[in-house]
Image: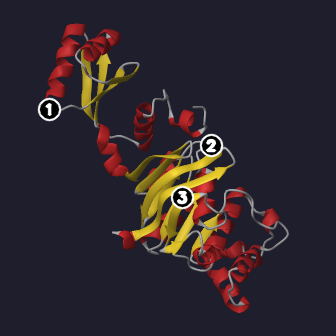
Amino acid sequence: MVEDLVISSTGLTKSYGPHVALDALDIEIKSGATGLLGPNGAGKSTFIKTILGLIQITSGDGHVLGLDIRTQGDQIRQRSGYMPEYDALNPNMEAIHQVRYSGELLGMNPTVALNRAHQALEYVGLGEQRYRQVSTFSTGMKQATKLACALIHDPELIIADEPSNGLDAHARNFMLNTLQTTVDSGQRSVLMASHLMEDVERVCSDIVLLHKGKLAAQGRIEDLKAIDKEIEVHVWGHASNMEAELKGSGMDVRREGRVMRIKHRGDESYSDILLAASKAGSQVRRMHDHEASLEDLFLVIMERLGHEVKSSDDLLKGVL
């Protein structure tokens, strides 16, 4: 239903002269956690700026929390928290005053902003370091401070751009847990832009995938994975011959060495695979339904768009 949507757009287009950064996007994002994905130049940053009302769109319509991105950008920003990828902190300020200042910029009373800054820094794990200067912080602590700045006014929507960028394993785990808690216990919505699909899959239930300014896919990760169910087969001996037999019988095969992933086409798929192995003289050591990852989903989407991609790195580094 429309009232359940946190972000929506119809024909959303943004052009910079002849360059089309966003190309007629029809997007629907429900409450909860959604991953915003795509290679460099896909339009992610432009999309974030448009929905926050920071730049004017060329054509189309968009709404955030029921507010028009064309005319109500200030209200959208008052009800949203933005954690940018770039360094947005003053290195000479103590963390408590950096976060307080963010609250005051949003119109909060100074006393209220200071109290909320204490709470926000405690929430992101920096309660004991709140009086240290930002310049003395590690990358993880700076990222946490940016998140505190985004959360100080208790927004309904948090937009986190590469929140785990540059973090070690411990800091990354804490950041993702904090975002999960914000969604699950805080009942807030998160739009998380990231190039780390493992992070997205951990925090988000839905994704929006942009490619060259166009919408490549959107929806629940579970539903999108079910589009191309596969069977994983581990074989021994004559793997190339078996691959040829499978393809000769019309089956879609993705192979890496002795491991093959074959598109599921019904209960007969298993017997067809065993028949192909018998003809090729191959031994099937193991065969099971493959639980697709988000990376597997990306590969399928890119293949359907006509690109040969070996890994998610190829996609997200923008080499296409």
Q: Secondary structure at mark 2?
A: loop
Viewer-closest of 100 and 82: 82
Q: Secondary structure at mark 3?
A: strand
Q: Position of residue 234 (x, y in %)?
A: 31, 23
**Residue at x-position 81% and y-position 70%:** 133
Q: Secondary structure at mark 1?
A: loop
Q: Position of residue 245 (x, y in %)?
A: 26, 12
Crowding near the residue tagged with mark 2, few <14, some 14–19, many ≥20 C-alpha atoms within 10 Å: some
First in sequence, mark 3 or 2: give its number. 2
Q: Amino acid at mark 1?
A: Asp
In the visual, does 239 lie left or right of 319? left
Residue 190 vertical placement versus 26 (above, below):
below
**Residue at x-position 56% and y-position 42%:** 212
Farthest-out residue, right: 92
The mark lying in front, picked from 1 and 2, is: 2
Question: CA separation, marks 1 and 2?
Answer: 41 Å
Quadrant in the picture for the C terminus: top right
Q: Quadrant of residue 116?
A: bottom right
In the visual, does 293 lie left or right of 103? left
Residue 3 vertical placement versus 169 (above, below):
below
Question: CA separation, marks 1 and 3?
Answer: 38 Å
Q: List the residue tagged with mark 2.
A: 40
